[in-house]
Amino acid sequence: MPEFQLGTFPATLAILFQKGVRYATAIDLGCADGNFFLECAHVGLLPGSIGVNVDANAMYEPSLREIQRVLGGHYLIAGVSNRDGEIELQTGSHPYWASLLPADDPYWAGLHNRPGETIKVRALTLDTLVQELALKPPFLLKLDLQGGELAALQGGEKMLAETDTVICETAPDEFPSVCEFLTSRNLGLFDLTEISRLSDNTVCQFYPVFLNRRLDHIKIKDLFKDPAQISALIAAQDHRRNSVLEKNARILAGIRGSGPR
């Protein structure tokens, strides 16, 4: 298995893979051309997993059909939300920015993305998706729904109980509600990935990774059972404090040498 850059989806999935986490089904909502499952399966991160690619935009169907032809699994052209039925997909300035959010939502306030034509698409919940396709747990769930992530999660009460890992696109203003929803359903924050920044370096969006708490035993606390590791950790903290004290001393000496302030 290749090495992956920390802070990316594959790196976090590789960490979990090395800790023994496996999935029967990998679901990607807002999958676009389906590259997430394709790439992760290709490098060996999802052995034995059935891929399920879902996107509301029919322009991606040729890509998804070809992935299904080669790798099997499923794809669906539909919107995933908190109810079954029909919903309007609002197109944007780029296909990647299309969203199920209404045209008056703050999502469309940025000058880079203006709402365009609306297209009616089938809507279904995560629980309906799992039932309809007879999908088997444990699940890996990835969501990239341009602001529709929380609504999609709300429609997956049953399946989330059998989901081991959730990767969810979010933004600083949306993250608290997404985090609260998932943590209240036994999924704890495990990692932060794919952090994007604006031109002034403020955080624009990121993808937190949540892990089912039934897997808490694989977290870092298990790395410190060896007394030698504990001693090394304490020595590292001593080294850190000595470095801080040396730096403080240099700064204070420079301030004293510059005369009265």
Image (cartoon, grey):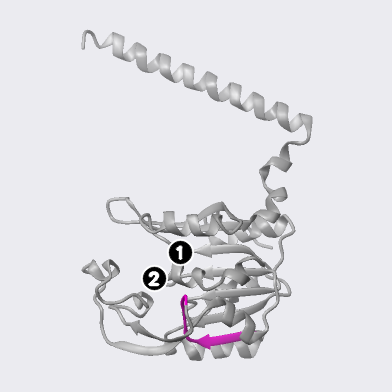
Q: Residue 246 at what x, y percent from top left?
A: 47, 17
> Is residue 48 in view?
yes
> Is residue 4 in view?
no
User: In the figure, residue 118 lies in which quadrant?
Assistant: bottom left
Residue drawn at (34%, 75%), measured in percent from left and top? 101
Please tell me whether residue 2 belongs to the stretch shown in magenta. no
The residue labelled by disc 1 is: 169
Mark 1 and mark 2 residues within 8 Å of each other at the beta carbon: yes
Question: What residue range appears in magenta?
Answer: 73-82
Q: Relative to 21, is 58 above or below?
A: below
Left or right of 120 in this view: 28: right
Q: Residue 214 at what x, y percent from top left?
A: 70, 55
Which of the two residues, 162 or 10, is positioned nearer the viewer here? 162
Residue drawn at (23%, 67%), measured in percent from left and top? 109
Q: Which amino acid does label 2 sit on?
A: Gln
Q: Relative to 8, is 79 above or below?
A: below
Mark 1–mark 2 distance (CA, rounded to whole Å): 8 Å
Q: Which amino acid does label 1 sit on?
A: Glu
